[in-house]
Image (cartoon, rainbow, N blue to C red):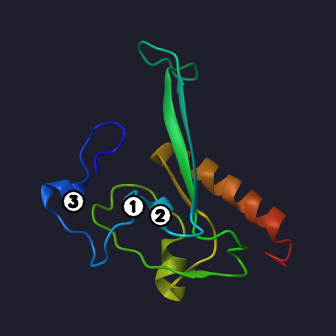
Amino acid sequence: MPVPSGRPRVREFGLEIGFMSPGPKNSILDVPGVAVGHTTLIEGDGKLVVGKGPVRTGVTAILPHGGNLFREKVRGAIHVINGFGKATGIAQVQELGVIETPIVLTNTLSVGTAWDALCEYMLLKNEEIGT
């Protein structure tokens, strides 16, 4: 099933990922309860001028279920293939085997901003964190 952009999916090349069949859309959203939010910021054209642009960035947030992740953790694991990007929270997932926050994907230079926003979100939802 090609994606809307017309690019083929990995299974169309004969590669099988995992042992379960894909859902009807072959999408993470086929999993009941999973929610995904995404935004892309594209502003300006031409040569980069630091502090002015152009800008090409984005962020994706994945919520494994609609409840409170801090109180209703989900099982999780980590596997690093390339190791070139920046990540936070890996040690906790490796040690505890659970995920207790939304999963946020962004570019290397925005990891700190994403981390700050995620902490603020979690503190608003769970005042007992850090007490």
View extreme (left): residue? 14
Residue 39's quadrant in the figure? top right
Image quadrant for the C terminus? Answer: bottom right
Q: Earlier in the sequence, mark 2 or mark 1?
A: 1
What secondary structure is marked by label 2? Answer: helix
Q: Tell me the residue that label 1 is attached to.
A: 24
x, y percent for residue 15: 17, 63
Residue highlighted by disc 2? 30
Residue at position x 50%, y 86% from top? 95
Q: Earlier in the sequence, mark 1 or mark 3?
A: 3
Going by the numbered disc 1, the residue's amino acid type is Pro
Contact (Cβ within 8 Å) of mark 2 with mark 1:
yes
10 Å crowding of disc 1: few (<14), some (14-19), many (20+)? few
Counting from the top left corner in percent of width and height, residue 124 is at: 83, 62
Residue 102 falls in image quadrant: bottom right
**Residue 97 appears at what percent x and percent y?**
50, 85
Instruction: Please tell me whether residue 82 is drawn above or below residue 9 in the rendered image.
Output: below
Q: Secondary structure at mark 1?
A: loop
Q: Which of the two residues, 49 or 80, is positioned nearer the viewer here?
A: 80
Q: Secondary structure at mark 3?
A: helix
Q: Which mark is residue 122?
A: none
Q: Are marks 1 and 3 in contact (CB under 8 Å)?
A: no
Q: Which residue is mark 3?
A: 11
Question: How much space separates mark 2 and mark 1, taking CA atoms?
Answer: 7 Å
